[in-house]
């Protein structure tokens, strides 16, 4: 962490991380923009990723039954050598396949993208472009499939989309939901697969980055408050997004991204 945070600052960033990690609006963008708008010191990429431990806890708790089945199914596939008659094992294999492009991109480019591209103008561009892409995917493609019908091609395509999330402002959930919608998945099924796919990537990134935080930073009320806020608000974000898109479109999130981009540009060119 580049600069120390107060307890309230850390909790606010945890709240923002928890809500925006799962809404298709980019948590990274918001964690950069909150200090920028409020004239705080940037808390640093390592601290941002460490807050993912809270959202990881939310994912694991919300999908605990799913993950129990996926892990059991995966080991059954390993033991038998195939996933015939084993839908949980089949899904687990395809989640693993879809994880690979994002993991490779994170390993190769996380440091560069997370530092060189942490710029408000970059965020305005990525928020806008990928917001429009989400809107098009939501409106232009049939919504007839569930994740029970996932194919190898689906997992590869959505995995490649997830790799784009290395760029701040793209949104991991937003881009994987967009990819799933383009593969004709129902809106809530696209969100569900996005969240299952996010779990191993968030776990890997968080565990790698938290090593770089000093023990004196991790063992503080400020850090604990941020992670706890991230976990609590992350859980409700998952719950209500899935419920919301069962009956409504992603249009509101695309519009929010465009509005936020406009606010960034106005602040950058007019207010500063």
Image (spheres, grey):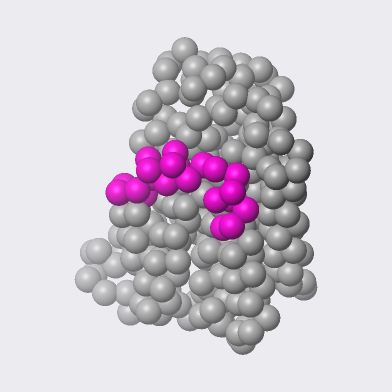
What predominant SS class does the magenta segment belong to? Answer: helix
Nearest the viewer among 162 and 225 is 162
Q: Looking at the picture, how far across and down is residue 222, in whole percent? A: 61, 19
Please name the residue shown 30% across and 49% down the image.
108
List the single residue furthest toward the top: 216
Q: Which quadrant is home to the C terminus?
A: top right
For residue 61, above or below residue 9:
below
Question: Is 19 covered by the magenta stretch?
Answer: no
Residue 227: which quarter of the image? top right
Q: Looking at the picture, how far across and down is residue 10, in whole percent? A: 64, 26
Question: Is 115 covered by the magenta stretch?
Answer: yes
Q: Looking at the picture, how far across and down is residue 47, in whole percent? A: 50, 30
Q: Is residue 91 left or right of residue 43?
A: left
One can see residue 166 in this view: yes
The magenta stretch spans which residues?
106-126
Nearest the viewer among 215 and 105 is 105
Please name the residue shown 42% across and 46% down the image.
113
For residue 247, above or below residue 38:
below
Nearest the viewer among 3 and 266 is 266
Residue 221: which quarter of the image? top right
For residue 135, above or below residue 19:
below
């Amino acid at each position: 962490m580049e600069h120390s945070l107060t307890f309230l600052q850390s909790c606010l960033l945890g709240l923002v991380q928890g809500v925006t990690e799962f809404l298709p609006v980019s948590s990274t963008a918001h964690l950069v923009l909150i200090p920028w708008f409020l004239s705080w010191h940037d808390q640093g990429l390592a601290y941002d990723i460490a807050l993912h431990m809270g959202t990881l806890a939310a994912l694991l708790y919300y999908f605990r039954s799913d993950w129990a089945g996926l892990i059991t199914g995966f080991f059954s596939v390993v033991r038998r050598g195939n996933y015939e008659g084993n839908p949980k094992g089949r899904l687990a294999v395809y989640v693993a396949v879809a994880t690979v492009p994002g993991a490779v991109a994170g390993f190769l480019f996380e440091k560069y993208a997370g530092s060189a591209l942490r710029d408000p103008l970059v965020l305005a561009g990525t928020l806008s472009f990928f917001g429009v892409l989400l809107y098009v995917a939501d409106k232009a493609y049939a919504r007839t499939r569930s994740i029970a019908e996932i194919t190898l091609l689906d997992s590869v395509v959505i995995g490649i989309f997830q790799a784009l999330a290395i760029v701040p402002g793209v949104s991991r959930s937003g881009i994987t939901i967009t990819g799933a919608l383009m593969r004709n998945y129902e809106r809530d099924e696209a969100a569900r697969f996005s969240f299952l796919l996010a779990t191993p990537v968030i776990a890997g990134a968080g565990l790698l980055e938290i090593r770089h935080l000093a023990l004196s930073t991790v063992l503080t009320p400020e850090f604990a408050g941020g992670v706890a806020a991230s976990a609590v608000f992350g859980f409700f974000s998952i719950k209500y997004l899935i419920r919301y898109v069962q009956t409504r479109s992603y249009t509101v999130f695309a519009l929010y991204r465009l509005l936020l981009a406009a606010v960034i540009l106005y602040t950058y060119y007019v207010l500063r």
